[in-house]
Structures are given as C-alpha cells and as structure tokens.
Image: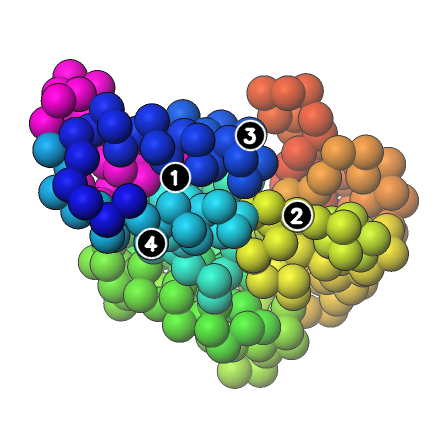
Amino acid sequence: MTETRTVNAALAYAIRVLRASGSPTPRLDAEVLLAHVEERDRAWLLAHPEAAAIEPAAFERSLERRAAGEPIAYIRGWREWHSLRIGTDARALIPRPETEFLADAAIARIAERLARDDAPIVAWEVATGSGAVAVLIALRFRQAIELGRVTLVASDLSPDAVELAAENLAGHGVERLVNVACGDLLNAAGRTLPQPDVVIANLPYVATAEVDAAAGSLAHEPRMALDGGPDGLNIVRRLLYEVPTRAAHAATVLLEIGAGQADAVRAMAPAGASVSFEADLAGIERVVRVSLSDSIA
C-alpha cells in the first residue's frame, strides 16, 4: 500500500493485514496507527473517511511492525498513562494501567507522611523502568521536593531503562527533582544514596515459563523487566529480604504484584511487618503495602 488512498481505504486495508496477523483488535490498531502517522486524532479520521491519507509509506512501515507483534506504544514512541504522555521504547516495560494503582498508593503514603510531622522523607522507586511513576510523584510533590521535605530516588538495574527514565523526567521538566541511579534494588541505600522511608517497586513478577511462552506485544518487551523466576517472585523476595537492613526504620514498602501472588508475598514479608493489599478494578489484589512498624501503618 504505497499509493495514496483515502482514510477509509487505508483503514480497510490495514484491518485486513492486522486481522490476518492475529491482532485481537485490528480496527483499533489500524485507527491508532493511521492517526499517529497522519498526525491526526482518531475522531478526525472517522469524521473524514474520504480524505487522502498522505503518509502511505509510513503507515505501511507501522503496519509491518504491528503485524510482527510489536506493541503500538513502541511504534508510536509513547503511551498515555495517568494523563501523562510517557516516552516508550524497547529499553523498558510499557507502563500499564495497573501500575496507576501503585502510583496512587505511593502518592497517598507520601502525603500521609508529610501531614504527620515535619520530618524529611525519602521516597525511592526501585525498578523505575520508563520512569512513569517517578515522573508522576515528582510532579505531585514538586514543592515539597524543592523545599527539601521529600527526596525522590529512581533506580533501575538496566542502564538502558535508566536512560529512558531520565529522558521522561526531562520531558516533563522534573529531572532536577529526582536522583536517578543505576543499581540493583536497594544496594546503594545508606551508602551513596539515603535510606528510604517509602519504597515503591513494580518488579518483574511473571513466572519464567509464562515469559518463555509469551507472544505478541509481551514478546517484544525486555525480558529482565518481566521474568521473576520460577514462581514470578524471585526479585520481590530479594527486595523484601533487603528492606529491614537497607530501608529506614519503620519504612513502608509498596509493591505491584500479579494475580494469585498475595498469599505468597504475605508469607515472605519481614518478621513483625504488617501487610495489607489493595485490589484493582478487576478485583485482583494488585498493590501490597508492607509496613515495617505497625505504629505508623
């Protein structure tokens, strides 16, 4: 499809291609991709079916990538998440709607701590990936960070992810508000970086067998951001083991977990910690809150 076609014809062609490739949402994919390459919104396309599609070659390339299973967020280079436009590419996991629950829980916890007293707070997002959660927290607590009441750290084991996170922070004008680091979990806490009062983490929690069998979009995302070992909880287990010695006294840990993992995570919480869960819109216990001291829970 290299010749100029109308919007309607371009969409019809794209739907056939994507349906044949196995896309579960061929019409939606076609509309989103055509809107992207034409620099229009989907509403405009639907309102102007006879308009000429002026970027047929670019549309063809995007269709080839999508037909091969590449996520639309990687093809477009961004994803809307929590009303923010987050840059996305193969360096990091694409931000999911479920992670909005983790971000909201983190914001609520930081706000609770700020309201309690004047003590400064260190919030640390481990495995920041694209940096979406760090961007949101930095925007929400910009004034508190500038006043020194909140210190925000974002880290990841992947240098590529750290680079993407830094780009997203800069793109939202908050790069100076966040300490970005490359490292394994909380290894630098108490050494080159402060001990956190609030730990936020969306760690890999997919079982290795599921990652091995992944197809479509999931197969294009970085394995290290997905693979949590045989039961999906190897990295979560390591973080919870580290927390009592790496985090501040009475710290709170907020984790995103997968379906059916709540009981296992409760069992691996540090001794004496209180554990609670928050369900997502599907009723899945999605966010776990581990408080090292009941006195501040």
Disc sitting over residue 24 in the figure: 3
Residue under label 2, please give it: 215
- Disc on res. 81: 1
Which residue carries the number 4 mark? 61
Judge the density around disc 1: few (<14), some (14-19), many (≥20) Cα neighbours within 10 Å: some
Tell me where the magenta segment starts and ends, as one range.
Answer: 29-51
- Which quadrant does the N terminus fall into? top left
Q: Is 77 included in the stretch rendered in magenta?
A: no
Is 159 above or below relative to 241? below
Labelled pair 4, 2 in contact (Cβ < 8 Å): no
- Separation of residues labelled 3 and 4 (CA atoms): 19 Å
Question: Is 251 or 98 nearer to us in this picture?
Answer: 98
Report x, y in % for residue 184. Answer: 63, 74
Q: Do the residues labelled 1 and 3 touch (CB within 8 Å)?
A: no
Q: Which is more N-terminal, label 4 or label 3?
A: 3
In the picture as drawn, the residue positioned furthest to the bottom comes out as 192
Q: What residue type is labelled 2?
A: Ala
User: Disc 4 residue type?
Assistant: Arg
Along the line of sight, the residue nearer the viewer: 40 or 116: 40
Whole-number angstrom distance, CA of label 4 to CA of label 1: 25 Å
Mark 1: which amino acid? Trp
Closer to the eye: label 4 or 1: 4
* Foreground label between 1 and 3: 3
